[in-house]
Image (cartoon, rainbow, N blue to C red):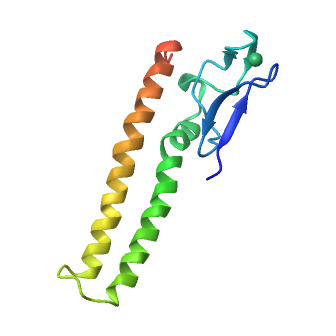
């Protein structure tokens, strides 16, 4: 799987690796390199400076990706329907898979994002 890495513009030290490249990152906007000790802008912004659309995007973009995954699960469930050897209705099984994936996605991403928003608000409180 491809990993996005972000590097210090002065010495090239990698400071962050992610599986996807989010458009909106929360942070003070600047970062100090651990190796060369120089400061640089990393493109991050604080929660208070985001527009309502950007806030929505920050919260839901990962969930949207996982939503697509949930639809794939749903389709696999429908394919399984043709086999028809499950005690549970195949359509029901697909629905359970889909709901389970959605709930798992929400359970994992929402608290993680909420913590990042909370930390951002501590650095720069909403006016
Ligand atoms: Zn550096």
Query: Residue 28, position in %: x, y?
Result: 61, 18
Q: Residue at x 46, y 50 (%)?
A: 63
Closest to the observer, 68 or 1: 1
Report x, y in % for residue 85: 24, 87
Residue 53 higher or lower than 105, as above or below: above
Numbered disc total = 0
Residue drawn at x 51%, y 48% as measured from the top left: 62
Q: Residue at x 32, y 85 (%)?
A: 81
Task: Check the image and name the residue furthest to the top.
Answer: 37
Q: Position of residue 106 (x, y in %)?
A: 37, 47
Could you tell me residue 36's position as x and y percent? Answer: 75, 12
**In the picture provided, is 9 more to the left or to the right than 58?**
right
What is the quadrant of residue 10 in the picture? Answer: top right
Q: Along the line of sight, which residue is nearer the eye, 11 or 113?
A: 11
73 vs 44, left or right, is left
Left or right: residue 65 versus residue 11 is left
Q: Residue at x 27, y 89 (%)?
A: 84
Of residues 16 and 26, the one nearer the viewer is: 16
Q: On screen, 1 above or below 36?
A: below
Q: Is residue 127 left or right of residue 5?
A: left
Which residue occupies the extreme right position in the image?
10
Q: Is residue 74 above or below residue 113?
A: below
Quadrant hosting residue 75: bottom left
Quarter of the render that holds ligand 1: top right
Q: Is residue 60 above or below residue 98?
A: above
């Amino acid at each position: 799987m491809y990993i996005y890495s972000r590097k210090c513009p002065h010495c090239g030290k990698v400071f962050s690796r992610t599986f996807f490249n989010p458009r909106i990152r929360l942070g003070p906007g600047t970062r100090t390199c651990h190796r060369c000790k120089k400061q640089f802008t990393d493109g991050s912004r604080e929660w208070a400076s985001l527009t309502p659309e950007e806030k929505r995007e920050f919260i839901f973009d990962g969930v949207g990706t996982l939503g697509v995954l949930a639809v794939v699960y749903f389709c696999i469930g429908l394919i399984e329907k043709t086999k028809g050897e499950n005690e549970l209705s195949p359509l029901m099984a697909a629905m359970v898979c889909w709901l389970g994936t959605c709930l798992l996605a929400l359970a994992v991403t929402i608290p993680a994002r909420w913590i990042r928003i909370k930390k951002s608000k501590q650095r720069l409180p909403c006016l």
